[in-house]
Image (cartoon, coloured by chain):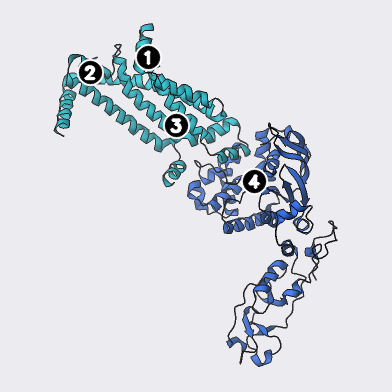
Amino acid sequence: MNDLWNQVDLFWTWLTASSQWHGGDGIPHRLLQHVYYSGVSLACAAVIGLALGLIVGHTGRGGFLAITVANIARAVPTFGLVLFVVVIEYSITPVLIALVALAVPPILVNTFEGVRGVDADAKDAARGMGMTGWGVLWQVELPMALPLILLGLRTSAIQVVATATIAAYPGFGGLGRYIIDGLARNDYQLVVGGTVLVVLLAVIVQLVFAALRRLVISPGLLGSASSS
Amino acid sequence: MITFEGVTKRYPGGTVALDDVSLDCPTGRITVFVGTSGGGKTTALRTINRMVEPTSGRVLIDGQDVRERKPAELRRGIGYVIQHAGLFPHRTILNNITTVPDLVGWNKKKARDRALELMERVGLEPAMAKRYPFQLSGGQQQRVGVARALAADPPIMLMDEPFSAVDPVVRAELQDEFLRLQDELHKTIVFVTHDIDEAIKLGDRIAVFQTGGKLVQLDSPENLLAHPADDFVAGFIGQNRGIRTLSFAATDGLRLSDEAVRPASADAAEAAGPEWVLVVDDDRRPLGWARTAEAAGPLGEARLSPVGPTFQVGTDSVRVALDAAVLSPSGLAVGVDDSGAVVGTAAGTDLLTVPTHGTRDGTDADDDAPTLSKEGG
């Protein structure tokens, strides 16, 4: 307990030092970089994962292949991928590619499972009442799969926010900068400061998704989930 | 009119779901497809809205091959109700019902008004419009399913075991309301069930399917009970065929006797005659049965046995009357009119004198004879 208090104290003095709030090395700038990398990666991953997951889930074809590829992709160490790609081309792009590769599998798998798991009777009724294939996808499968899809997006978002620290390794800043610098200089306060900021960002992501859940998921789905 | 012309459905692997089925489903009537599981009845239903494409043969609606129309467009003109309702859990009851109107582009207000009107018709509180399916009971969900299928007022309704997943009490309720609704709407209905009693209760015509997708008999419920085409159909119909045939015999031609009916003011001493007398009030409503041997003084003050079930003359079938007779302490069935006033009584044996064409005379196979309900004794 005492130990924890020390760390909070350490973090607080670090956070409130005025020098932290200005310039390229300041927290606002690093935080913005971090959010930017995370956001771009997540957006790309969402487009890829949702599109593939919806198509595969709706048609029922290629499901095994998609899931297998996604699981293999999960096993590839992101850090290695960053190093490997940075060797080929020194820019932020390889870092983003690594983050996208990390974020796609949870989104893809959850979207696929969400669509595949949609009540067969609801789909049959939708088709039988004259919805086209697209109609069934947009009006029935997607909204009914949303709880799982959001879960996938949230999992990816948190992973990406935590992993985006690797952008600092090849020198592209972000909150990882503090951690890497701290480790290099044996500056414990710096390591704790960076880590806590990443954790706080992850908590904010959680909160955003909790709000999204209430906003975009039909009460008809949330109600039945909690009552059964 | 829906016409099947030599419709066969063979799946890859050789399973035959429908074997050269030809039949008509007349406009404005209820045609029930009934049979064992694997008999192809659901497959047959699904060829009508192109949810299943036949391997050979044609399905025509009013003379037009269903394959001449795009599936989605065809289906929007045909109501579709399935076993577990298949409601959209993410949509409110109102928005479930407006599904087809929304698809065909009605304006919001018109679709909403129509949905509310239909909710009332199928017996749902308007307050339910904003609820979600999970908040409704199975029976209520099925009502929403029916309302949803009726929303764009399609001339044809396909109903695939719509009442099978609810308990027997709710099922009977839904069936009665379904018949009442059909009396007003006169849709061309194809109704699939595995329950022969449901088929007999609801069907104007019944098509019996046998495993392997063969249509073995297409007939009125009366004729199906009276003349099953073969052992399979007879076995499928099950026990008590004879008694069940009485469901189609009307009570309006019955000779009812006033002999055992007494006003409450009558004195027990004057009641001599029959062993039991039915005591009625000034409006001829039945009060109970009195045993003449035990009663003394005014009958209204005598100890009365409960009347038990009665039958409504002209509305209820002879089967109901027979049931009432069996359960009555006197062995007499009490016939009442629509106000509940006693018309007269009939003994169980009198009820059986109603000509029950076909069941009494097993050799009479004249299928064209008028239904026995018109032949009161």
Q: Tell me the amino acid under the disc marked 3.
A: Ile
**Residue beneath label 4, please?**
B160
What's the distance in space between the residues labelled 3 and 2, CA to CA?
A: 35 Å
| Element marked by disc 2 | loop
Q: Nearer the viewer, mark 2 or mark 1?
A: 1
In which quadrant is the N terminus of chain A drawn?
Answer: top left
Q: Is residue A39 above or below residue B151?
A: above
Judging depth in this view, the residue of B188 and B201 nearest the camera is B201
Work out whether disc 2 and disc 1 sit on a shared chain: yes
Residue A44 visible from this viewpoint? no
User: Percent position (x, y) of residue B246?
Assistant: 74, 65
| Res B277 quadrant in image | bottom right
What's the distance in space between the residues labelled 2 and 1, CA to CA?
A: 28 Å
What's the distance in space between the residues labelled 4 and 1, CA to CA?
A: 55 Å
Chain of residue at mark 4: B
Judging depth in this view, the residue of B150 and B242 nearest the camera is B242
**Residue beneath label 3, please?**
A149
Work out whether disc 4 and disc 3 sit on a shared chain: no
Q: Nearer the viewer, mark 3 or mark 1?
A: 1
The color chain A is rendered in: cyan
Q: Nearer the viewer, mark 2 or mark 4?
A: 4
Q: Tell me the amino acid under the disc marked 4.
A: Asp
| Res B325 quadrant in image | bottom right
Q: Earlier in the sequence, mark 3 or mark 2?
A: 2
